[in-house]
Image (cartoon, helix red, strand yellow):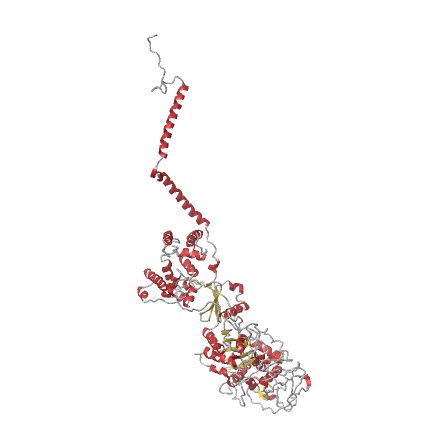
Amino acid sequence: MSDDPQPQRPQPGWAPKDPQAADTPEAEAEDSAEDSAEGSAEDRQEGKGRAERTGWRRLIPTWRMVAAAFLITGLLVVGGFFLGYYLVQIPAANALATQQANVYLYADGSVIARDGEVNRENVTLSQISKPAQHAVLAAEDRDFYTEPAVDPMAMIRGAWNTLTGKGKQSGSTITQQYVKNYYLRQEQTITRKVKEFFIAIKLDRNQSKDQILEGYLNTSFFGRGAYGIQAAAHAYYDIDASQLDAGRAAYLAALVNAPSQYDVITHPENRAMVENRWNYVLDGMVDEGWLSEGERAGMTFPMPKETTLSTSMSGQRGYIVNIVKKYLADQRILDEATLDSGGYRITTTLQKHKQDAFVDAVNDKLIDRLDTDNRTVDTYVRAGGASIEPKTGKIVAMYNGIDYVKQYTPNATRRDFQVGSSFKPFVFTAAVENKSRTQDGHRITPNTHYDGTSKRPVQGWPGNRYAPENEDHRDYGDITVSEATDKSVNAVYAQMAVDVGPDKVRQTAIDLGLAKDTPSLDDAGPSIALGVATASVLDMAKAYATLANHGKRADYTLIEKITRGQETVELPARHTRQAVSRQAADTTTSVLKGVVEKGTATAAGTAGRPAAGKTGTAEEDTAAWFAGYTPDLATVVAVMGQDPVTAGHKSLYGALGLPRMNGGGAPAEIWGEYTREALKGTPAQAFSLRLQPGAWESQPPSDESTGRSSTGDPTYDSSRAPDADEDTASRTPDGTGKPTPDGPTGGQVEGTATGDPTGGTGTGDDEGATDGATGDDDSDGDDATYPGGLTGALTQNARRVW
């Protein structure tokens, strides 16, 4: 063997520490790849060690993670804000927030009623007292005028207090609360809260603080069904919001927090809690400099009224509201749809003290005397009344029924009861106005003589025989027009209607104030004189007011003023015209004075001042009337009989425990008491009258009837009835030209409307049942036939007139 060293075989896993340089490029590349692979493995091993943190260190984010989270959150918040601001628009107001009641007021501004589903009356900020504004700010948001639309910190604080049981608190500013009230709904949802947030910000940019506060005060709920501070002021204190002082305003401001619980009348047990809230509000006003400490120290808690003026339709209120609505529609002032939109403030001509006096008089003289438990007829009794200022035409009071919610029909405006003998003055007015003469040519004056025999057939009527009966079948014989009016003699006035002409009588009644479409007015013959027409109480009051105003008819009105917000609704122009001559109206007044002084209506004398009027009773005693006036006031009262179940007309025999109901009873008594109270404090005035020529000149008394015809009177002298007009007002000291009447005054009897409207047959009761054309009802057997087709016994007297 050779002594040279032999090469050794490498051990497994061995590698030279310093590998030899590669002899070729391929070898170099292979070596480089191996180096890179080894470096990558080392790096992976190091990274694996960092990711595998254990324990609590695993819960801590790296600074890179924290920074990234803040950045992303900020971007989301800012982006979400701008997105929300862009997407959420200010919507239209919700229906509830825009609904308002129509407010109906007396002439003095006090509230009659409010109608509508929502009791709200919007007012401007200037119409809300400063103490009221400050009280609400002290209670709800003292920094309102200096803060932004939203207060995130307050919202967070409110949410925290709510969660921790310190009471539900919204943390909302007044702007946010207004947005909720006016634009959104009241549900407590995240969506509503988000919308409220963005709308409040936008609204604060579009409206002033005063506008927002005004809107808030008009939309907040204060309890008792009152939305807005104006409605609340009336609901709790019966005053306007402009009249609220600091004490009352602080109570209303306290109510906003919990309206139902803070009403101390409904929940007296909560008074201590309410007073604490009230004190909180007042203290806040002092802190803000809105109330002096001296004023604050002297304040006591202002208890709200237990019974304030109701906004419901009970009592007279519902009647008045519906009558006013109809008047507005009929006069084309406001149609139903326009009025239903709400927000109108309607000042009527009704005067509260007169309205109250009317209700009291009806209660005293009628309602309180009813015994509905023991007298069925008393359950039929209804009453209606209307009162008008003659010079202005203003309707100052109405009575329509005991309660609108119990009796819906307005008795002052219904046209379904006969007016009875209260119509007779229109016949005499027509006679004077048309210078009418009797059948034998005598001028009709207060002293003209007629035959007052009951069931005496009228003369000169071409239609069927008409022979009205006087009340109680009483014969009066020879009687003057004045006496016949005092005693309401049917026979005289039926004949006078023929002497004048029914058409002229009808036209005079319309000229005075009755409606052209009054039922049974157009088709009545001689029976028109007895009041077969069914005019309303209000229509009759209009007509009597024209007589009181010397024949001048004013356009009658129920409305003084209408406003809506700052706008005033234009009302039709009103006019006064001479409906009938002054002599015709005044001569009628001179005659009607006797009815009150010594006729069927002496009960009306309790008014304690000069008065004129006429009673009337409808057929079958279904209605009794008194229509009368002083120089200052014309008023008509009617008592009616109606079945409460069927609504049919019912007789009132036995009502109030009396044999019959007549105009000289309860109606005249109501009129007297009402007029006395309504005019209390007003100096009594005498009538200033200008009468027809020869109005009260004496006429020769008539002789006893001899059965001869009164036509063709050979002794008639036309000079007894002068045609020339003259002023006779100064003939007597009282200015009426009327001497003291002589002769018997008779009992208090009156006429009733009976008979066929056409002048044919009738079924009358107290006042003038008419005989048929054949005279079958004439038990005296005096149905002789006379020229012209008239039947019945006619008197023959040279001085007799018809």
Could you tell me which quadrant the N terminus lies in? top left
Residue at position x 39%, y 17% in the image:
23
Q: Nearer the viewer, residue 603 or 345?
A: 603
**Residue 495 figure quarter:** bottom right
The C terminus: image quadrant: bottom right
426 left or right of 190 in image: right
The x, y position of residue 219, in whole percent, is 44, 60
Q: How many marks?
A: 0
- When the figure is inspected, residue 554 is found, relative to residue 13, above or below; the finding is below
Is residue 35 in sight in this rendering?
A: yes
Q: Quadrant of residue 237?
A: bottom left
Tell me, yes or no, if residue 687 can be seen here: no
**Residue furthest to the top:** 1
x, y (%) of residue 424?
57, 81
183 is higher (above) or lower (below) than 732: above
Q: Quadrant of residue 489?
A: bottom right
Of residue 203 and residue 190, the one placed in the foreground of this image is 190
Give the x, y percent position of residue 660: 54, 81
Q: Position of residue 403 (x, y in %)?
A: 50, 71
